[in-house]
Image: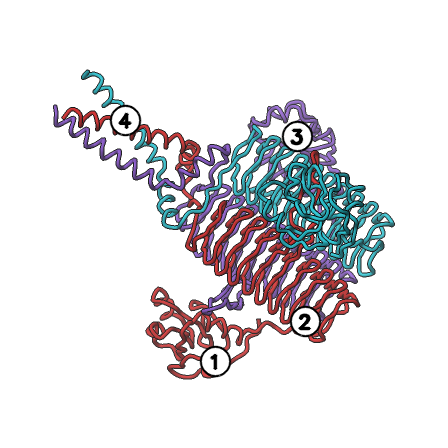
Chain colours: A red, B cyan, C purple
Amino acid sequence: MQAQSVMASDLVSRLGGVLNGSDISVHRCASLANAEHDCISFAVGQKYRKAALESGAGALIVRERDISLAEGKTAIVVADDPLVYFARVLGILHPAPPAAAGIHPAASVSPEARLHPSVSIAANVVIEPGVVVDAGCAIGAGSYIGRNAHISAGCVIHQRVTVCSDSRIGERCVLHPGAVIGSDGFGNAWAGDHWEKIPQIGRVIIGNDVEIGANTTIDRGALDDTVIADNVRIDNLVQIAHNVSIGRHTAIAGCVGIAGSTHIGAGCLIGGGCGISGHLQITDRVTLLGGTVVLTDILSSGVYGSGLPAIEQSTWRRNTVHWRNLDEMAKRVRSLEKTSNTMREAGSNKK
Amino acid sequence: MQAQSVMASDLVSRLGGVLNGSDISVHRCASLANAEHDCISFAVGQKYRKAALESGAGALIVRERDISLAEGKTAIVVADDPLVYFARVLGILHPAPPAAAGIHPAASVSPEARLHPSVSIAANVVIEPGVVVDAGCAIGAGSYIGRNAHISAGCVIHQRVTVCSDSRIGERCVLHPGAVIGSDGFGNAWAGDHWEKIPQIGRVIIGNDVEIGANTTIDRGALDDTVIADNVRIDNLVQIAHNVSIGRHTAIAGCVGIAGSTHIGAGCLIGGGCGISGHLQITDRVTLLGGTVVLTDILSSGVYGSGLPAIEQSTWRRNTVHWRNLDEMAKRVRSLEKTSNTMREAGSNKK
Amino acid sequence: MQAQSVMASDLVSRLGGVLNGSDISVHRCASLANAEHDCISFAVGQKYRKAALESGAGALIVRERDISLAEGKTAIVVADDPLVYFARVLGILHPAPPAAAGIHPAASVSPEARLHPSVSIAANVVIEPGVVVDAGCAIGAGSYIGRNAHISAGCVIHQRVTVCSDSRIGERCVLHPGAVIGSDGFGNAWAGDHWEKIPQIGRVIIGNDVEIGANTTIDRGALDDTVIADNVRIDNLVQIAHNVSIGRHTAIAGCVGIAGSTHIGAGCLIGGGCGISGHLQITDRVTLLGGTVVLTDILSSGVYGSGLPAIEQSTWRRNTVHWRNLDEMAKRVRSLEKTSNTMREAGSNKK
């Protein structure tokens, strides 16, 4: 992306913090390893000491207590939270190219849709009747917005996203390519000799400032709605089934599956590849380590895991046999304990 | 979706069952919790007693034996299977909006394709030469139908679906947004110093009344075909590799992966997040609990699991260490048993 | 796909190997089970003896040492590696239909993009300013190529692929339908009371001869790049997070997730459904069995697993309880060992 250029002192006047050393012009954000003199980078904690000292960055963002990491740098920006500060510098130096307002001639927009004049609609976008798109939204090439969906102000919908009928997307959401919002939930009734589809008439309701990853799928509710609260962050290839609700600020890494009607609290961190069964309650501030399988409610905040770490094949093979026979091993331990107790008692009796 | 309105007595004359109480007009299907007086809902089993009695639903569908759940409701519909009955009421009160027959001007349809006059082809659909689309099909915006594919009567192909060349889709199938049918299988031959692609020339053959979820992928066969039998139900983000076959009525929840050449029987229920290795045989009526890994054939019907439940981090950490050393623990138990036997024998000898 | 027709002797003159028996014309590649007399098939190893002898194939490719498998076949092609040989025969007999050079009138190609005259651009493709597409590339219907992306010579980009801005795709790569290359990495900074997006300004750099499966997602780097080396093979529904690097010839099966900043070596084989944590180092020539969870570095080449095999539900239920209590069981074994030692010593003292 095209970089701008800015003085370090300008950053401090816009974002706060304190400038030590000399003022310089920075053109680019960069990692410590790849920063050159016209770059700004950041470092948090002494484990980055070596990388920071060796970095070619002209400007470095550090905490007060980490100031020694910035030794020798031309411009030193002292901030409370260098990562958050750096994220904002990125937004200044590397803004997303603005999407041109207007409707691309190759888009198909229903005359019964209501689009704010400031919106940007790319080629091959399809917008159905009853859709509302509020101010400042950009909808990327090939995306589809179904009947009566509402896209609130400031959303960025990237390429080839599907937003199905009746979905509501809050303000400033970002939907990445290939995401599908509001597809039918997996509702099937067994009618004696075949499955019958249970029509899915709920909606997907997404709050403000939510980000949804590439090729992630969020199903509409069966009767009631699937609800994603404000500021939830969802990575790529995540499946969220019908009638799930997810609380504010919860972040969900890639390849997670959440089955139907499960409620996840606020401030949770769900690691990559976790699987969560249906109809469960996960309370607030639960962290799940990567690869965790959740089969029952989690009612206390805390950190949970279940994934087994990789081990060398021959050990793995033997251990999986023991896993199959774990109940038998437990019985053998119990039996040993009985024998041991009997013998100890026998021993005591002899005394 | 737009709701119709219908008398409870009309439902009974169309769908069977018996109407108790008074006849009323119902406008909407709803969950017990959110039903108002113009709504119809359903309840099965005494665990829904409280919710049913507190529900504002004007009409309730129950089994004969659950009739007490409907106490106080205006209209009581007694049916053998309330869920199936309710699914059908949903179809009556909340029909999918009919897709207009005809070909959208922004679609690209090959003159060498054969489309029944009743089909509905949305904007940006691409249909290649040799394709056949039978009566009553609707193909959603941005979908692609490859060379010589055959879409049988009554299919609903939602938005941005890819049906690759030579695929055959049976009657009344539903394909959700982003699904990919007939992409190349993962076939690679190691040629001493590099991978060479093994061209994939099989097809995907899908039976009647199959539903395939959003962003699910089903690969074409390498030489022979990948086969999905009638009335199979597949959820979102499922991967089905080349030459897999899946028997009738099997239902597969989200995030499942099935590796190449595995054969899954009829009437199976595959829970979310399961992974099934390649070249396996899974017999009929096998249920896999969520998160199960299948590495060997399953030749007896029944319920199987392997997912470990989440536990608190510190316990998890200790237990994973024991997991690494499970073989050693087994040896120690064996050694204790030997010692114990020797001592018991020694004890007996003394007597 | 349309098959050509070729003499067995022609195959040998083009691909090497030795022809035994009579020369015949072959029209089609087929599996042993479904081959007819005009077909060519292959067999490697005595476990295919019965299938090979019963096969109706007119021509069979075998190794010298497996020549007895071809008894009775009209044409016998002896080759060092029958699978590689067969892969090449597939390319000859079943070539992909050539994409017509030229730009479909329903494509939207920026005048500021640079396309080689030989490229084929299908309907509804969108190509942004600054894109370069080199000789012989085919871009399938509905695909999107973002600003300044570079597609090198000979690539096949199938339908509905998204290649985001600044991505570089090497020569002869194949991208399957629905793949997303270069979407934003999952970068969030906690700003005290809400998540703030960390703009992602790295790129995705893909080498030559790489294949990427349907609906797979590869995120752009945060600051530096995400890098996929030459001849890597990636199956469907794989998630590769920001700043991952993957070494040459590594093959990754379906449903794998690789978290941010992990480096995977060359020549690795990653089985289906594996999950690999972030910031790890996996050395060269590591094989991960299907369903393996990797939570720590793997610094020695070899084969690793962690997936537990499916077991019958009642045993599974008991074993998961033991899993929860594994630490307690370990303590009980230790306690038994102590008692046992004490008693043995007591026994010795008596002597």
Give the amino acid at mark 4: Thr
How far apart are the alpha carbons under marks 3 and 4?
60 Å
Q: Give the Cα separation between the discs numbered 4 and 2.
A: 76 Å
Q: Are marks 4 and 2 in contact (CB under 8 Å)?
A: no
Q: Residues within 10 Å of mark 2 (few under 14, many from 20)?
A: many
Mark 4 crowd level (few <14, some 14–19, many ≥20, 10 Å Cα): some
The x, y position of residue C173, in whole percent, is: 62, 54
For mark 1, name the chain. Answer: A
Residue tagged 1: A11
Identify the residue at horizontal 20%, vertical 25% (top origin).
Answer: A346
* Secondary structure category for the residue under label 4: helix
Mark 1 vs 2, N-terminal side: 1
Discs 1 and 4 carry the same chain letter: yes
Q: Nearer the viewer, residue C274 or A40?
A: C274
Q: Which mark is residue A339?
A: 4
Residue C110 locus on image (x, y percent): 71, 69
Chain letter for the residue marked with disc 3 in the picture = C
**Pointer 2 residue:** A134
**As shown in the figure, which amino acid type bears the numbered disc 2?**
Asp
| Residue ID at (49%, 53%) | A282
Sooner in the amino-acid sequence: mark 4 or mark 2: 2
Say which mark, if any, is on residue C32.
3
- Say whether mark 1 and mark 3 are on the same chain: no
